[in-house]
Amino acid sequence: MLVTPVPGTNRRDLREDLRSALEEVRDLRAGIRGGLRDGPRPASARLHDYLEWVNETVRKLEHQVSTADIDRLVRTRGYELLLSSGLGRSTLPAEQETLSGFISAELDARYAAFEAAVNAIEAQIRRWSMRAEFVVLDTTVYIHHPQKLEELDVAALIEKPGEAVHILVPIAVVDELDGLKRTPQRGRASCALAVLERAFQRSTGPEPLPRDDPAAVSGGEVTIEIVFDPPGHVRLPITDDEIVDRAQAIQPFAARKVTLVTYDTGMSLRARAAGLSEIKLSHQRGTEPQ
């Protein structure tokens, strides 16, 4: 994901607004106004057009994507320099030429950034348009569930027997499993990581969940993929919050509820407060972790 939609964002509306911003910045680069090529314009006029585009684009996107995304896509370091340079008030030919060069470079960069964002969101929509239940398993499920990952009947676990399931693995979960390799839970952590390595030999997904005995698990197809942090993402200090945040960010792209499965009460409450579907598992008597 190259952008992080805020909860409640419609993925198709976001895609159209990103496309619109891309087309507008393309026209600015080409000197097109009102659908017609306008011919050479003074640098100060180009600066005015660029700043208007920034303000309008921020207005369109500020309630759909994170502030970090807006800063990365629109309110960039180049924007700050152009806004504060004072060159737009100068009439000296050399300074006007310098300003024009700055504007051209910034427009080129904005075009590339928005083109990448549009391509990424279109690819993500295609990728997550599958007919399946979307599930995020908390790290506790990989460690404490009686069945190991390759044996897990996920459809039954979420009370949707027979349904196809797509398991989303935030990279923060992988990092937690890596960290547990140096603890008493290292056996189960290593087993889970080994299954992920088998699944993702050629890509990061979606891939079928590896099964030692496919006939032993009833239900529909189970696929799995790694969900990486978006560019510029700063992780939350509490890993449970981070995992819930990543699951919440998936919902607008997937256009469906994501179910988070956990053994922890705190994680369950966090997921519920974030608008996720959640299932809290209970340890079977005699299997509680020491």
Image (cartoon, grey):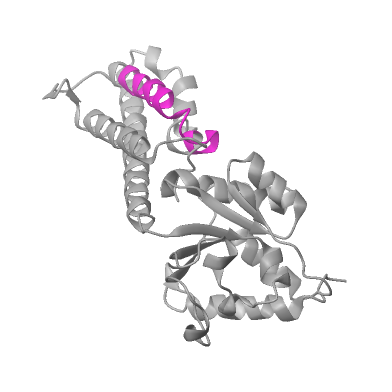
- Is 4 part of what is drawn in magenta? no
| Residue drawn at x 57%, y 50% as measured from the top left | 246
Residue 127 image point, x, y percent:
36, 58
User: Where is the C terminus found, in terms of image quarters?
Assistant: bottom right
Q: Is residue 228 above or below residue 154?
A: above
The answer to whether one can see residue 199 in this image is yes
Residue 167 image point, x, y percent:
51, 64
Q: Nearer the viewer, residue 115 or 161?
A: 161
Residue 114 image point, x, y percent:
35, 41
Residue 97 image point, x, y percent:
30, 26
Q: Is residue 187 above or below residue 134?
A: below
The answer to whether one can see residue 236 in this image is no
- Prevailing secondary structure class for the magenta stretch in the rendered image: helix
Q: Is residue 20 left or right of residue 149?
A: left
- Is 66 part of what is drawn in magenta? yes
Q: Quadrant of residue 128?
A: bottom left
Q: Is residue 44 left or right of residue 153?
A: left
Q: Quadrant of residue 274?
A: top right
Q: Is residue 144 above or below residue 63?
A: below
Q: Is residue 83 left or right of residue 102?
A: right
Magenta segment = 48-70
| Residue drawn at x 50%, y 66% as measured from the top left | 161
Number of numbered discs visible in the structure rendering: 0
Residue at the far right in the pictured view: 290
| Residue drawn at x 73%, y 60% as measured from the top left | 263
Q: Nearer the viewer, residue 211 or 281?
A: 281
Q: Nearer the viewer, residue 32 or 102?
A: 32
Residue at the far left in the pictured view: 36
